[in-house]
Amino acid sequence: MTESSVYIGIDPTAARLSAYAVLDEHLKIAKRGRASIEELVKIAASYPAAVCAVDAPIAPAKGLLEDPDYRHRLGLDPKRANFSAFRVCEYELRKRKITVSTTPKDPEQASKWMQMGWQLYEGLRKADYVEYPRVGSRRMLETYPYATFTALIGKRPYSKSSIEGLLQRQLVLFEEGIEVPDPMPHLEEWTRHRIKTGRIGRKNILTHNMLDALTAAYTAFVVEREPQNVVALGDVLEGQIVLPVESLMDLYQ
């Protein structure tokens, strides 16, 4: 670990421009914004030491759960095909009632945002980023902010499209020590008159894409600074989902 390391989080799930955030070793926001895949690779390549966490599958599915022996090792009925369409990491989340998108085996059948994620990972590889759990001055990994919020809260969060979901997520990040505005003063504006007349502003409340990018960057920070507080779900053969928590509950409501 070097003092010059930065921690990059990228959320390519939105549209043409992806949300990104860069944290320093003190969890202060060094940079954040929206950028194309090409611009994101240039940003990541500009840092000699960095960990980059991306909210997207790192590779197409390999069909590991189609193998009866593999299913048996996970405690699944080897004769039944349920869960066989998922990557192992996706199964590990779904069995805990944490919803997650299914990554197909055929890249052509993948959602646009997944394909953008693969373009990003390929660009990072060309910039000498190595895939977790490998160690190097530049590392990259897959994460899933929704699962991170679920684990940190202890239950599934409010919808990220709602104001309470945004406040909840920003409060979680604030209490983890990330340099985001404290969302609690925002509630002081929730007077009867303002609610009735639709005059509740969103000043200092970040978008859900930026909150996800910051959560990914926080995951990158924990991977390097507090590796004992990391869970890596799944099989390295098809990609692991890395979360910044020591352990997961068996079920989340």
Image (cartoon, helix red, strand yellow):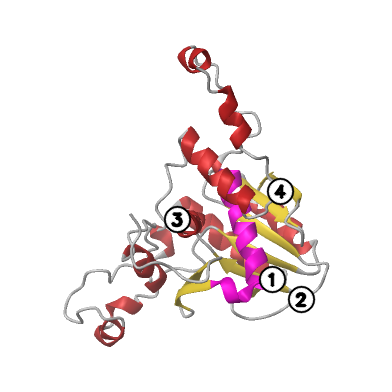
Q: Camera-side residue: 127 or 188?
A: 188
Q: Which mark identifies residue 150?
A: 3
Which corner quadrant holds the C terminus? bottom left
Q: Nearer the viewer, mark 2 or mark 1?
A: 1
Which corner quadrant holds the N terminus? bottom right
Q: Secondary structure at mark 1?
A: helix
Q: Which mark identifies residue 188?
A: none
Q: In this figure, which residue is indicated by the disc labeled 1?
A: 225
Q: Is residue 210 magenta?
A: yes
Q: Secondary structure at mark 3?
A: helix
Name which of mark 2 and mark 1 comes first in the sequence. 2
Q: Nearer the viewer, mark 4 or mark 2?
A: 4
Highlighted magenta segment, given as a residue range: 209-230
Question: How far, Cα to Cα, is label 1 from label 3?
Answer: 22 Å
Classify 48 as above or below 98. below
Is the residue marked by circle 2 packed among few (<14), some (14-19), or many (20+) residues within 10 Å? few
Q: Is residue 219 magenta?
A: yes
Looking at the image, residue 116 sits to the left or right of residue 99; the answer is: right
Q: Secondary structure at mark 4?
A: loop
Q: Main secondary structure of the magenta part?
A: helix
Going by the numbered disc 2, the residue's amino acid type is: Met
Q: Secondary structure at mark 2?
A: loop
The answer to the question of whether label 1 and label 4 lie on touching residues, with beta carbons closer than 8 A, is no
Q: In this figure, which residue is indicated by the disc labeled 4?
A: 179
Question: How far, Cα to Cα, is label 2 from label 1?
Answer: 8 Å
Q: In this figure, which residue is indicated by the disc labeled 2?
A: 1
**Residue at the spot 38% in from the left edge and 70% down from the top edge:** 87
Is the residue marked by circle 1 packed among few (<14), some (14-19), or many (20+) residues within 10 Å? few
Name which of mark 4 and mark 2 comes first in the sequence. 2
